[in-house]
Amino acid sequence: MRRLMKFLHTIGAIGLMGAMACLVVLLGFLPKPSSLPEYALMSAAIGAIATWVFFPSLALTLIAGLLAIALNRAYHSAGWAWAKLATGIIIFEWGFTAVLGPLQEEAEASARVLSGEADPGTLVLSVTAERTSLWVLLAVAAANVVLGIWRPRLTSLPD
């Protein structure tokens, strides 16, 4: 069971970091809202990646990591495991509020504008905050990978 949790955690982390890298690239190529059909298409693709790759990978990584800690008694007192848990929860929360939500909302808004149901003024003119958030989340996720491989003796918590 421990190996399965480690495998699922690793697969989730690969998907999560891959989705974040993909989103950073796509946000860099996002056209201006003035070319509405292209903007709506790219926003829909970005929203789909956030919904169907980023979010499930994020959930799998966090759940498998929590179960791995629960199943392996050695992790209960390992400082590096608790550091990974803390940063994992930060990634989970920030991923929802700064990445998933805004990207899904923009995809929906651009679809409404394209169909004539909404005003083009409702579209976000800049995705700088989302790109910056993704870069920060990628850095934290990379630090989590380093913690998981290196397993430094941060502090030893009592049992």
Image: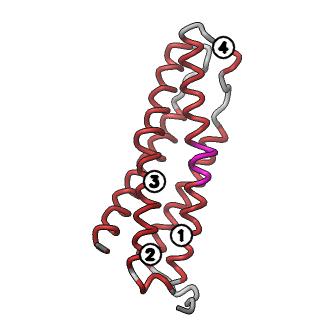
Percent position of residue 149, x then y: 41, 75
Percent position of residue 134, x then y: 57, 48
Which residue is tagged 2?
69
* Mark closer to the observer (3, 4): 3
The amino acid type, in three-letter code, at marker 1 is Leu
Is tag 1's residue or tag 4's residue first in the polypeptide sequence? 1
- Residue at screen point 41% across, 39% down: 52
- Residue at screen point 67% across, 41% down: 129
The amino acid type, in three-letter code, at marker 3 is Ala
The amino acid type, in three-letter code, at marker 2 is Ile
- Residue at screen point 51% across, 60% down: 141
Distance between mark 2 and mark 4 Cα atoms: 48 Å
Please identify the quarter of the rendering in which residue 102 is found: top right
* Image side of residue 129 versus residue 96, left or right: right
Q: Give SS at disc 3.
A: helix
Mark number displayed over residue 59:
3
Percent position of residue 31, x then y: 55, 23
Distance between mark 3 and mark 2 Cα atoms: 15 Å
Magenta span: 93-99
* Image side of residue 32 versus residue 55, left or right: right
Distance between mark 1 and mark 3 Cα atoms: 13 Å
Which residue is tagged 4?
120
In this picture, is 86 found above or below 15? below
Q: Are marks 2 and 1 in contact (CB under 8 Å)?
A: yes
Is tag 3's residue or tag 2's residue first in the polypeptide sequence? 3
Say which quadrant the N terminus sits in.
bottom left
